[in-house]
């Protein structure tokens, strides 16, 4: 039964706010169940993608299921199974409370950083999907609404095995012309053939010239048709990173990513302040408490949290808020399946300072078959308006690509 609007308009009718609330809850109950919903189960399945994607499902007594994804890592499914007793019987709409509850309950497992954080994040993403379905709202609405209808995607092209600058330029041109991306990334922690000892993190002059040549060829080939970033994967010493960043300042570099190991914030700050080449960091930091230090110290020009690794959708939103206070853009690192990729897009549309979300699986032919909906079109993700994340797992595709020995979670 819906709201009796004729009765509501009748000045002589006795229609209290309690009546209206009850009627409204009745309407919501038909759509999803209102607040009278409880979690009944939490299950995981690992899919053998270009990484072992850990998909998470949260089940309720209303028959509604939320789907999320945790960053890959050994022990994540076991940690999620350990958290199940802390969730069963709880209301899935209390996302923040349940998140903090899990952080407190798993403090012994190290809920400050690492795989425990990503396990919690996988559940948190599923809770956003579930809450959106219950409330009949897209997930981005739970984060405060949207700034844009679609989110830009940058394609991680890696680097040709032989690290040939011309081959990299050829691939950049192909991805732009044939696949429709206007944002790319290539690796620079690649062999040049000139290395003497890679363990010491030192770049010899010839190695820097080789990396600068990759940057030159790629950026010159695509010019204004695409922005291009370059990833170093925490490989170089502080001085080598400074010299490399200086050597590529003359080229149109979108950003240089993770040039030094992540542990020493002083060195990171020194490298970033030494150059006009934009420096991007954040993939190997956890929760807003860690990334806040990077941002407040001026140790990063563009912050790159990995949403299902850093702590989930709301944690990424908190990081973006801190970054926005310091006028720092956000480019989300992402090596996920379509599930966390779309979840990251929901975050990306809800924050003003979003640059792009990474796509790491362009060479994996079945990536987009994991869900029924189209995800990336012409280098962008149209943020779904359907409730929750707005995607539907293709259970046949999940079953086809499940990691050997893994059990498939329940379909409903």
Image (cartoon, rainbow, N blue to C red):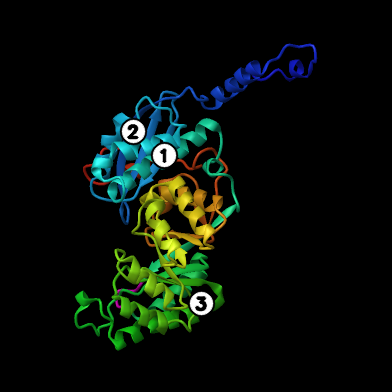
**Vertical placement of residue 246 versus 99, above or below:** below
Q: Is residue 297 left or right of residue 378?
A: left
Of 375 and 242, nearer the camera is 242
Check whether the beta carbons of the residues at disc 1 and disc 3 lie within 8 A of each other: no
Give the Cα distance between marks 1 and 3. 38 Å
Give the Cα distance between marks 1 and 2. 10 Å
Q: Within 10 Å of the Cα at label 1, are there few (<14), some (14-19), or many (20+) other Cα atoms? A: many
Secondary element at image label 1: helix
Secondary element at image label 3: helix
Sequence-earlier tag: 2 or 3: 2
Q: Quadrant of residue 397?
A: top left
Q: Within 10 Å of the Cα at label 2, are there few (<14), some (14-19), or many (20+) other Cα atoms? A: many
Sequence-earlier tag: 1 or 2: 2
From which residue to which does the magenta span run? Answer: 159-163
Check whether the beta carbons of the residues at disc 1 and disc 2 lie within 8 A of each other: yes
Secondary element at image label 2: strand
Q: Is residue 403 left or right of residue 158?
A: left
**Vertical placement of residue 42 versus 288, above or below:** above
Q: Quadrant of residue 296?
A: bottom left
Magenta highlight: main SS: loop
Determine which residue is flagged by label 2. 42
**Quadrant for the C terminus in the image:** top left
Determine which residue is flagged by label 3. 222
Q: Is residue 336 visible?
A: no
Determine which residue is flagged by label 1. 126
Q: Within 10 Å of the Cα at label 3, are there few (<14), some (14-19), or many (20+) other Cα atoms? A: many
């Amino acid at each position: 039964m819906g709201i009796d609007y004729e009765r509501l308009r009748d000045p002589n009718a006795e229609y209290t706010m309690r009546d209206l609330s009850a009627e409204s809850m009745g309407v919501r109950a038909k759509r999803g169940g209102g607040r009278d919903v409880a979690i009944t189960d939490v299950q995981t399945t690992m899919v053998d993608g270009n990484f072992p994607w850990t998909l998470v499902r949260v089940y309720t007594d209303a028959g509604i299921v939320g789907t999320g994804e945790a960053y890959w890592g050994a022990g994540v499914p076991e940690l999620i199974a350990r958290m199940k007793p802390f969730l069963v019987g709880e209301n899935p709409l209390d996302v923040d409370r349940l998140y903090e509850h899990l952080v407190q309950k798993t403090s012994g497992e190290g809920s400050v950083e690492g795989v425990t954080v990503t396990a919690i994040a996988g559940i948190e993403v599923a809770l956003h999907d579930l809450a959106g379905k219950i409330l009949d709202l897209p997930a981005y609405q739970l984060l405060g609404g949207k700034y844009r209808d679609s989110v830009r995607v940058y394609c991680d092209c890696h680097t040709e095995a032989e690290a040939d600058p011309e081959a990299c330029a050829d691939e950049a041109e192909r991805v732009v012309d044939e696949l429709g991306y206007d944002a790319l990334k290539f690796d620079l922690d690649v062999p040049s053939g000139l290395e003497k000892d890679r363990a010491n993190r030192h770049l010899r002059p010839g190695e820097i010239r080789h990396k600068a040549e990759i940057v030159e060829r790629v950026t010159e080939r695509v010019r204004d048709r695409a922005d291009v970033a370059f990833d170093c994967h925490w490989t170089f010493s502080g001085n080598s990173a400074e010299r490399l960043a200086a050597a590529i300042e003359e080229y149109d570099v979108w950003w240089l990513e993770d040039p030094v190991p992540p542990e020493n914030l002083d060195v990171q700050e020194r490298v970033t302040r030494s150059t006009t080449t934009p420096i991007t960091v954040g993939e190997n930091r956890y929760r807003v408490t860690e990334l806040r230090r990077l941002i407040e110290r001026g140790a990063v020009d563009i912050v790159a949290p990995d949403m299902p690794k850093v702590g989930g959708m709301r944690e990424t939103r908190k990081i973006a808020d801190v970054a926005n206070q310091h006028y720092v853009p956000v480019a989300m690192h992402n090596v996920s399946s379509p599930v966390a990729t779309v979840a990251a897009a929901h975050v990306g549309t809800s924050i003003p300072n979003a640059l792009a979300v990474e796509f790491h699986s362009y060479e994996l032919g079945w990536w987009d078959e994991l869900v029924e909906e189209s995800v990336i079109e012409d280098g962008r993700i149209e943020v779904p308006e359907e409730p929750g994340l707005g995607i539907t797992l293709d259970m046949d595709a999940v079953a086809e690509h499940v990691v050997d020995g893994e059990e498939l979670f329940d379909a409903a």
